[in-house]
Image (tube, rainbow, N blue to C red):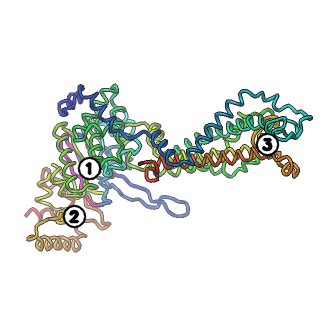
Amino acid sequence: MSLIEVKDLEVHYPIRSGFWNRVTDEVLAVDGISLNIEAGETYGLVGESGSGKSTTGKSIVGLEKPTKGQILYKGKDITKPSNRRELDYNQDVQMIFQDSLSSLNPRKRIEDIIAEPIRNFEHLDKNQEKLRVLQLLDIVGLDADALYKYPHQFSGGQRQRIGVARAVATNPKLIVADEPVSALDLSVQAQVLNFMKRIQRDFGISYLFISHDLGVVRHMCDNIAIMHRGRLVEIGTRDDIYNHPMHIYTKRLLSAIPETSVEGRAEARAHREAVEQEFQENQSRYYDKDGKVLPLVDVSATHKVALPEDEIEEEDK
Amino acid sequence: MSQNQLNRQSSISEEDLARLSKEAEQEATPSSLRIVWNEFKADRPALFALVIMVVFILFVMIASLFINQGQAMATNIMDSYDKPFTQFFLGTDQGGRSIAKQLILGSRNSIGIAIGLTIISSTFGICYGLIAGYFGGIVDNVMMRIYDFMLMLPITLFIIVLVTIIPNYNVVTLTLILSSFYWMGTSRLIRARTLSESKKDYVAASKTSGTSTFKIIFREIMPNISSLIIVDTMLSFAENIGVETGLSYLGFGLPTNTPSLGTMIANANDPSSITEYWWTWLLAAVEIIILTLSISYIGQVIRRATDASQRLGDD
């Protein structure tokens, strides 16, 4: 059984307008997605800005209230606050935020920040708690003298590691990492990602890794879901997505990964332009008449894609 | 179980605890009290204002314990309008009552009311603003309509009517009446900041850490708007001294046999007092000016201390 099952999740925001300020329209931030996260794996959720990937992540930790659909954890629907309280859900599911500065309370010391989930979920005495905080700091590679400092005294990478330490403090089963490294420069990205990988190996944590950076996702994730316009366009293993992409949107994302080879420059550019042209010309075949993504169809045991049936047969040949 | 797992992953064990905490303490950032003190040292006028305020308030509070109010306010026609430094240190008013004693008792009453009023109205206003701003939506809507309604009331007239209706009122009841009308400015200000503050990621992080709503509002958000709270409280304290003295000046503040800075300034309501008997009102007026100026100086220092980019005393 999967660790977490998301079933037909929908998050719609009302748009109010007019004289009476009534609901006149809806933003379909997340429009019916289903995915399963297994224990110990890293699940990548990829898409452009505004595709609803952060909203999905926030719904899974319980920060966003879904309009419809279920999120099952230990057989219970955790979209209901009462079920979350009963399970002590957030002890098992934690989050790493994109903006490391604003996600740490500027008025609290590092000790209090990291100890916050420990204080709420596990009742340790003062020394045990401090020991735990020191060990967590050690695991993410920070010295003990960070203990009584404030967040603004650290660099971006250090702050993000503090965020990681807080997220693993209660030894969770799943961490939702919402673009954890996109605000950091490249060398620091690698550092934080390696810490995250090490922690996963040591503690057996699953990640839901939300990102728009396909290079990073390739480094981190076992299974990947591509999201566009609030829906999933393609789900598959790393091999399925990177080596056999089927949906035009996935191909577009892949062609946009920057490469640093001078010789291949013209070739990469030609490829990019070809993909873009195909997208512009054949958009109507990949999306329905309202511009929505088509329902997902099975291609293989692991690979699903949102394409019309005839298209899949064609691709298979 | 997780503790064992951690012990395996980290080289730190219980033996290191004492040593490491000591190391961390050496690296700790200075406490906020120390920062405030450094800021006072860097700003001499403000330090002077602080000394004046502290010494004056202590003097007034202690000295008033040794003065019998009934005796001090007893009329004695024979001493009417004695000049300062004759029989009485600071002279007497029309009723032959010592100005010096009235000044001490009056300051105690006026400052006491201002402090009480500030504490009650600011506490209520801050809580009101925090709750409205944090929950937003319908809660905010209802609370802000109540606020709008309160704002619409003619406060001064209301207080005058209440004071005439209530048969027996004293310092405490006056403070309570005033505080029920002076929380609005604070609450709107706090609400506005809370609205933006509660959308930040650290609040979301606290929610996922399992912190209760009450704790998030008062332990997470409130410290982050503390500079606003301190400055607003300081300013409203200066303002509140004016509220009571103004009412007493008009004759609707404290009862006539209770001295206050306002009733003393009210001595200046006829031309002969203003020109001939200046000592009956001038000292109270000067005292109010000095007090409010000092408060605003101190408020400035505290505001600078809470905002790292404005600090003078960092070096």
- Residue type indicated by callout 3: Met
Mark 3 Cα shell of 10 Å, populated few (<14), some (14-19), many (≥20): many
- Name the outermost residue toward the front: B86
Chain ID, mark 3: B
> Which labelled disc corresponds to residue A157?
1
Residue hosting label 2: A249
Q: Is residue A145 magenta?
A: no
| Real-space Cα separation, disc 1 to disc 2, in angstroms | 32 Å
Q: Is residue A166 left or right of residue A242?
A: right
Image position, residue B216 (x, y; %):
44, 40
Q: Is residue A102 above or below residue A278?
A: above
Mark 1 and mark 2 in contact? Answer it, CB < 8 Å: no
Image position, residue B241 (x, y; %):
68, 44
Q: Quadrant of the C terminus of chain A?
A: bottom left
> Which labelled disc corresponds to residue B264?
3
> SS of the residue at dot 2?
helix
Q: Is residue B191 left or right of residue A97?
A: right
Chain ID, mark 2: A
Work out whether disc 1 and disc 3 sit on a shared chain: no
Nearest the viewer among A101 and B277 is: B277
Name the N-terminal-most of marks 1 and 2: 1
Q: Is residue A41 left or right of residue B152?
A: left
Nearest the viewer among B260 and B174 is: B260
| Real-space Cα separation, disc 3 to disc 2, in angstroms | 81 Å
Residue under the image location 74 percent in, 34 percent down: B105
Q: Nearer the viewer, mark 3 or mark 2?
A: 3
Q: Nearer the viewer, mark 1 or mark 3?
A: 3
Residues rendered magenta in the picture: A36-48
Residue under the image location 16 percent in, 40 percent down: A201
The image quarter containing residue A140 is: top left
Is the stretch drawn in magenta largely helix, strand or loop? strand
